Amino acid sequence: MELGERKKTILKAIIQTYLETGEPVGSRTISKYTDLNLSSATIRNEMADLEEMGYILQPHTSAGRIPSDLGYRMYVDELIQEKDREVSQIQELMIQKTDRMEKVLKQVVRILASNTNYATMITGPSLHHTKVKFIQLSRVHEMQLLAVIVVEGNIVRNQIIDLDEPIDEDRVLRLNLLLNTQLNGLASEEISLGLITKMKEEAGIHSGVVASVIDAVAEAIAGDSEEVPVYTSGATNIFKYPELSDSGRASELISAFEEKEVLADMIRETIGEKNDSTEIQVYIGNESPVQTMKDCSVVTASYDLGKGMKGTIGIIGPKRMDYENVMDNLKTLKNQLDRIFRDNDG
Amino acid sequence: MELGERKKTILKAIIQTYLETGEPVGSRTISKYTDLNLSSATIRNEMADLEEMGYILQPHTSAGRIPSDLGYRMYVDELIQEKDREVSQIQELMIQKTDRMEKVLKQVVRILASNTNYATMITGPSLHHTKVKFIQLSRVHEMQLLAVIVVEGNIVRNQIIDLDEPIDEDRVLRLNLLLNTQLNGLASEEISLGLITKMKEEAGIHSGVVASVIDAVAEAIAGDSEEVPVYTSGATNIFKYPELSDSGRASELISAFEEKEVLADMIRETIGEKNDSTEIQVYIGNESPVQTMKDCSVVTASYDLGKGMKGTIGIIGPKRMDYENVMDNLKTLKNQLDRIFRDNDG
DNA sequence: GTTAGCACTCGTTTGATTGGAGTGCTAACA
DNA sequence: TGTTAGCACTCCAATCAAACGAGTGCTAAC
């Protein structure tokens, strides 16, 4: 069956009404809501068609209709853009300029959560593929070194190294030189076992201390490169949506937000999936890459830090989400973030 | 009225039964549960007395009794110790040795949460009063410095400083020397405006760059010293206790766990309150320092990192908490932590 | 001091009733 | 042929009363 213009209008009306109320919507409501000037009976006929086509469904006989996943999908893909996009002016979010990325990210999720009333998350950039820019070993004590590693994007990583035997300033100096010449410009995954062995050799002698320092530094670079920090906010917003807040579901969702691993997984999946990940992506219900979110919709956008580093912002809410508002919010936020980090990188 | 031995036994029986079931407990249950061999009628008389004394209360006529805050208090203070404390062997928790404190703490809350089935939290040590041990400025670019500050306890803090004009190696070297000689051994709150001015003068000349670097370093030391990291786990455990999991209360509690600030406040309060904070402290219901927790019990213990740095572990659960188990858990954990950090500080 | 017995209370469960929202279908209409 | 009015039907949600049962307090007997 064809999805004619009138059916589209009706479908859109159904979905928009449902987004607002969260209750099944009946034919009479639509009859009055739209300017189609059709009686409820006619609407009923159309609704029967729409149901047959799979765009809407009835929780039970004698209830109104609610959108199906397919219906939402249609709404997001086609119905939403048609026009509407005139105003939707979201004021530039007041992001305080600060030099610590962590703080920016925390601020962003918080703003987004309070703006949208959904649960939000953001990942810091993955350190995968980023290159070492600067390494500094310092002697804190004679038995203790501090390794500081700066990678592209000015992410700083530090590691205290406890030694088995004392080390003198001179050796630290030489180690510094060695580390910088050898590792500078390399990404963590380029630091192979072979390279490490080679460095140990070059460091001369069979000195156990030197070897252990090199190992520690290599580990510091490699070790955390897999871990992506994830910040969340507004997890309790899910209590605002009855369809998500019965204690079983709520517990599962909130757990995901607390543990963060599920979220990180989700991001990984979504990134792997499409390459044009600069665009905003919408996952409705079962489309979501992780099972935990099958009753939710997830909207993600990735922001760009330059040098190939990307982070992801995400919003998790009920399927009856205000997609338009959410997508607009994400778009402006994404742009702002892109700008901030570009400026910052100097 | 006197709280005789028999009344104590009965009170204890009531509370223990209530801890298990969460339902008001009636006289008949107690009559069978204890080995006092008293009829339910007698128990009823005693219960009436206990109620009059304020240890237990009736949700409504014709319901069993539940412990009051006072009753719990009595239980924790006197009834619990009497014996019982024979076995309560909690196996040493398998804390993986790792050099990053952050990881240890995250691990600890997680273990504790899964061991007790309550929500748990832990704070890292406050940097208040801790002394600067080592400062290192490095030139990442000609327009960019990296300041690394190590304070007692090997907490490392770093800060990227963007400059308005280039700075040369030589000046960085001298700044390093100056910063170390001036600030070494000082706690953040000892770095006064006067000292900063004096340093700027000593740095010679009216160089704007130097001044801004000094400011940035001072800020890095002072700025974060107030913030205490808080890690949490098992927030969703509260869903296991119906008295806490109706969506209003749950939302509020989980919010507290997400935002962390309430928790930090709570810790601050409890520390201020008593000085013998090496002991385990129990806050029942309204005894809690923060309003959010008024329907919960909070049990805290502080662990010691030496050099006056202390952190706090806390468990938040329903008032009908398994106090014995919780306190045991905290005790062993506290000891283990004390040991780990003492070894680590070497 | 303890206990059996009994009347009483009060929350919870159960089942029946009602009201209303909404549908599908049919027949009439333009 | 598409639209509409009308009506019977379905099913959920809310309401209410009755029955139930756990537990109490009190009294009188042991």
Image: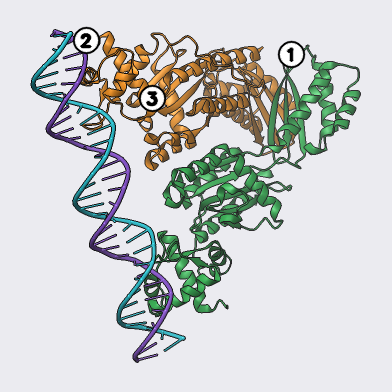
Chain colours: A orange, B green, C cyan, D purple
Check disc 1 and report the residue beneath it. Answer: B143
Image spot of residue B49 (x, y percent): 50, 75
Q: CA distance from mark 2 to mark 1?
A: 64 Å
Residue that appears at 40% across and 15% down: A274
Between the C-alphas of marks 3 and 2, the distance is 25 Å
Query: Between residues A282 and B41, which one lies in front from this camera angle?
Result: B41
Task: Say which label, 3 or 2, has the lower sequence index.
Answer: 2
Q: Position of residue A36 (x, y in %)?
A: 30, 12
- Contact? badges 3 and 2 (CB < 8 Å): no
* Chain letter for the residue marked with disc 1 in the picture: B
In the rendered view, does A268 fall on the left or right side of A160?
left
The amino acid at mark 3 is Leu
Instruction: Label 3: state its secondary structure.
Output: helix
Judging from the image, what secondary structure is the residue with disc 2 in?
loop
Q: Residues within 10 Å of mark 2 (few under 14, many from 20)?
A: few
Residue type at mark 2 is: Glu
Q: Is residue A342 above or below residue A60?
A: above
Q: Which mark is residue A19?
A: 3
The image position of residue A342, as x and y in percent, is 61, 12
- Do the residues at pointers 2 and 1 share their chain? no
Q: Residue at x 41, y 8 (%)?
A: A83
Indicate the quadrant containing the N terminus of chain A: top left, top right, bottom left or bottom right: top left
Could you tell me which chain the residue with mark 2 belongs to? Answer: A
Tell me where residue A188 sits by quadrant: top right
The answer to which of A168 and A207 lies nearer the viewer is A168
Q: Are marks 3 and 2 on the same chain?
A: yes
Q: Determine the chain carrying the residue at label 3.
A: A
The numbered dot on residue A2 is 2
Please tell me the numbered disc located at residue A77: none
The residue positioned 35% from the left and 13% from the top of the image is A79
Q: Kindly identify the amino acid type of the residue bearing the numbered disc 1.
A: Met
Disc 1 crowd rating (10 Å Cα; few below 14, some 14-19, many 20+) is some
